[in-house]
Amino acid sequence: MFRGQAVPVEPLVPDRIHDIDLAIASTPDEVAVECAPWFVEQGGVVVDESAAHRMRDDVPLVVPEINADAVAGHSGIIASPNCSTTQLVLCLGPIQREFGIRRVVVTTCQSASGAGDAARQELLTGTRELLSGQPHQNKQFEHPLPMNLWPKIGRILENGSTSEEHKMVLESRKILGDDNLRMAVTCVRVPVENCHSEAVFVETEQPVAPQQVSELFRESPGITVLDDPAALRLPAPIQCSGHDDVFVGRIRRDDSVEHGVAFWCVSDNLRKGAATNAAQIAELLVENRLVENSR
Ligand SMILES: NC(=O)c1ccc[n+]([C@@H]2O[C@H](COP(=O)([O-])OP(=O)(O)OC[C@H]3O[C@@H](n4cnc5c(N)ncnc54)[C@H](OP(=O)(O)O)[C@@H]3O)[C@@H](O)[C@H]2O)c1
């Protein structure tokens, strides 16, 4: 049932896929690898949430506020980025346009729901167990998350980074169109149910003042500035959950470099980090008649 109406749910098998112009796919990577091509072979277009196709040359990786033009070059699949990448590039895009970017340093605080619904449930159940003195056995996370945090998301790579950190670098470069963008990333899983937060330091090419960045963010689509520490109005996960915008606060000078700005951004990873972005890509395709053209 959805909004009071029965919606049929069918198994995802190739011979059931007919006359589908546009599909939004939100499955594990291995399912996307196998199944997305089925829709394309039938003349359909797939907006894919998974990481399976994001770095393919023939697959645009799109955050509509930043690189909407990229959809024009699609060949059947358009990818939506990693949730941590989306909120980051939404903020970096305007800074890149106005001031140029030399280097980015970011630490993420990623919620349990970013690892899927079973992981979100494990955090809630585990927290109840811990507070009532019962033993907690982690299954979804490789380390217990309640009252804890874990500085490793994905696999450890040869250079000591994790696959999640590597994804953020490659995806940000692709969306911002700068293959040489210098980035240092640390991804941390935190015991928050929903919404990812990021501490971001940006070294710019041109001189930059926090007030300029604040004004730039205020006029940028998809961003809400919430930056009044005196009134205790700053972005925090519980307050940002359920909203489509990326919330930014703590905008300040980074005095450790010649031209630098620092800020904190929070986004609902299930909304702008996933579903909202995919729906916006779908709207973009329809508005630009890029669905019909592929048939
Ligand atoms: N969570 C986030 O913040 C986030 C953000 C950006 C991107 N993503 C990406 O979005 C995708 C889904 O993530 P999630 O967090 O929603 O994970 P999830 O809560 O574990 O959900 C996985 C979904 O995939 C479906 N599925 C699994 N195998 C399938 C199959 N063989 N055929 C059809 N459907 C199948 C599941 O359907 P059933 O429930 O019926 O099993 C479920 O709806 C992943 O690729 C993830 O990397 C997630």
Image (cartoon, rainbow, N blue to C red):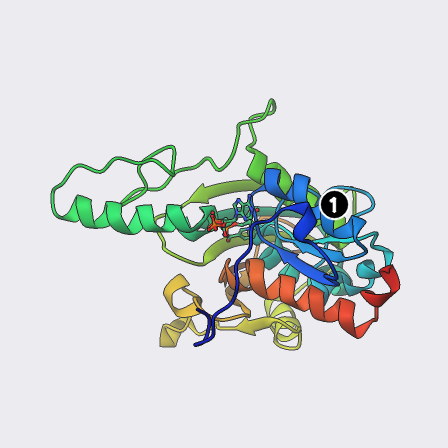
Given the image, on which type of amino acid does mark 1 rest? Pro
Question: Residue at (50%, 42%) from the top-left corner?
Answer: 187
Residue 194 picture quarter? bottom left
Point out residue 101 in the picture as x, y percentages from the top left corner: 72, 53
Q: Considering the image in quadrants, where does the N terminus appear?
A: bottom left
Report whether residue 144 is seen: yes
Residue 184 picture quarter? top right
Question: Residue at (77%, 57%) from the top-left corner?
Answer: 44
Left or right side of 192 for 251: right
> Which sits in the foreground, 74 or 222?
74
Report whether residue 262 is seen: no
| The residue positioned farthest toward the front in the image shown | 15
Compared with residue 169, is residue 111 higher up or lower down, i.e. above or below? Answer: below
Q: Which residue is mark 1?
A: 37
Point out residue 241 in the picture as x, y percentages from the top left corner: 43, 66
Point out residue 258 in the picture as x, y percentages from the top left corner: 67, 52
